[in-house]
Amino acid sequence: PPYRIPVLGDILGASQRTPLLSTMKYAGLGPIFRCKVFRKEFVFVWGAELAADIADETRFGKHIGLGIASLRAVGGDALFTAYDHEPNWRLAHDVLTPGFSREAMAVYHPMMLDATDRLTAHWDRELAAGGPVDVLGDMTKLTLEIIARTGFGHDFGLFELDRPHPFVTAMIGTLTYAQYLNSTPFPGLAKGAARRNEADIAYLNRTVDDIVRARRDAGGGNGDLLDRMLDTPHPETGERLSAENVRRQILTFLAAGYDTTSGTLSFALHYLSANPEIAARAREEVDRVWGDTAVPAYDQVAKLRYVRKVVDETLRLWPTAPVLMREARQDTALCGEHPMRRGAWALLLTPLLHRDPGVWGADAERFDPGRFDAAAVRARPAHTYKPFGTGARACIARQFALHEAMLVLGLLLRRYELRPDPGYRLSVAERMTLIPEGLRIRLDRRQTPP
Ligand code: HEM
């Protein structure tokens, strides 16, 4: 970047609130650029060719650094924070992948419906009170309820509380601290923040230990993820997850499972409220496909093809997990041009990849679900859309997240008309994930819902 300051590096215009997004302004430097902050150097890539090359699993693997490395204090060698070479990654991956099969998802579906009922009861009360709804706050409650119930049979009762739940506060505290460590040159100075973080982690661990104890006392649950973690041996080796690893996996699933999806749902509701013609088309589809069935069945969700495009387009503009860190497995040259030593790594910035004008056109900033029409998808090169990551370390719960997002959007479109709150301007912040900070929208109950 221009304006490099001696010793400090490229700190002009860098933001602690949005450390990744603030680098997007350097896109004009080209599809690969290098930033320096103090003595650290970061390589960013975003072009389609570079993304395709760095997705080559024979030469590149997941890099555990920055915020993900900080999160190892909570996740250790659980799925998200494990190094590629750690044996517990393969063990947990193989044991837990069937937890996201079609059969498993069909079991989660009624739990997702039940949690969404709590949200709509809450929104009906807010509507009666006449105010806008706190979209991000309520989506965060909803997605945490969903992952806690479907994963671990736990009900936090978040919609019935009138103050923030300490678990949510501790979880957000830990994610924010991990990001802070990532973007501050002198982390050792913030002793108070470090102590609060230790207290947050201790609280998270206690909560999870209580959940596991209750499950063991009950002699098992309904075949959810926790049952799998506790009881299922590896299909080939017969090995099981250790108690310590189960604790880490639960925290990982809770952390990975709610903020990403709550951000996705919130951004989608923002675009639906701001684009009435897109919302009308999606609502028409929901009415047509779900008809007058009071409660949509599992199989009826995937049939919402246009709603799915709304979700895909939302994740194009705001891939809520916005960076993939990739590391060279051996000395190599990215695209045959940029030399990388073994262990060197780069950040693939998906919000930039997903806005590459060469791939998405000059109007890449515009929200247009039509970009995901089958013909348009076929015409695009591979590796130009990666909201769920890449290769073996891609999101294990992609189908879960898509089902959840489509179900919730379908239920909300069916019940409400959505209007933007006139005082709100989209403001995107980072707390490891991307979030539409302070998003509010206004609702009307539909006159003739089916
Ligand atoms: C991994 C995105 C929902 C659990 C990932 C990765 C991305 C991602 C990009 C790869 C990260 C990397 O390479 O460093 C998303 C998005 C979601 C979502 C955009 C919602 C729209 C969920 C949910 C869960 C979950 C609901 C849990 C139920 C995980 C786990 C991993 C992961 C455990 C690590 C997988 C591994 O390394 O083996 N996710 N995710 N995610 N995600 Fe998701």
Image (cartoon, rainbow, N blue to C red):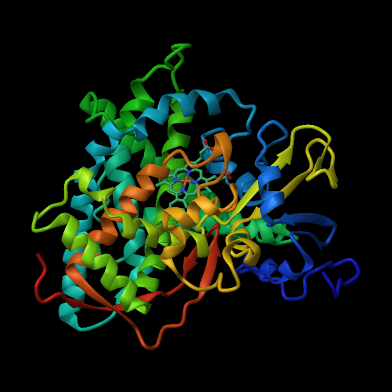
Residue with the most extreme top position: 237
Judge whether 229 appears above or below 297 on screen: above
Q: Nearer the viewer, residue 423 or 161?
A: 423
Image quarter of residue 35: bottom right
User: Residue 236 versus residue 203: which sits nearer the camera?
Assistant: 236
- Identify the image quadrant of residue 141: bottom left
* Residue 176 image point, x, y percent: 54, 59
Q: Is residue 89 left or right of residue 307?
A: right
From the viewer's perspective, is 435 left or right of 410? right
The structure residue drawn at horizontal position 47% and vertical position 27%, both measured from the top left corner, is 92
For residue 252, above or below residue 281: above
Q: Can the viewer see residue 318 in this picture?
A: no
- Is residue 405 visible in the rendered image? The answer is yes
Q: Position of residue 310 (x, y in %)?
A: 38, 62
Relative side of 58 to 36, left or right: left
Q: Residue at 53% across / 42% down in the picture?
A: 74
Image point 20% across, 84% down: which residue? Answer: 130
Q: Quadrant of the N terminus?
A: bottom right
Q: Is residue 332 toward the left or the right of residue 108 in the image?
A: right
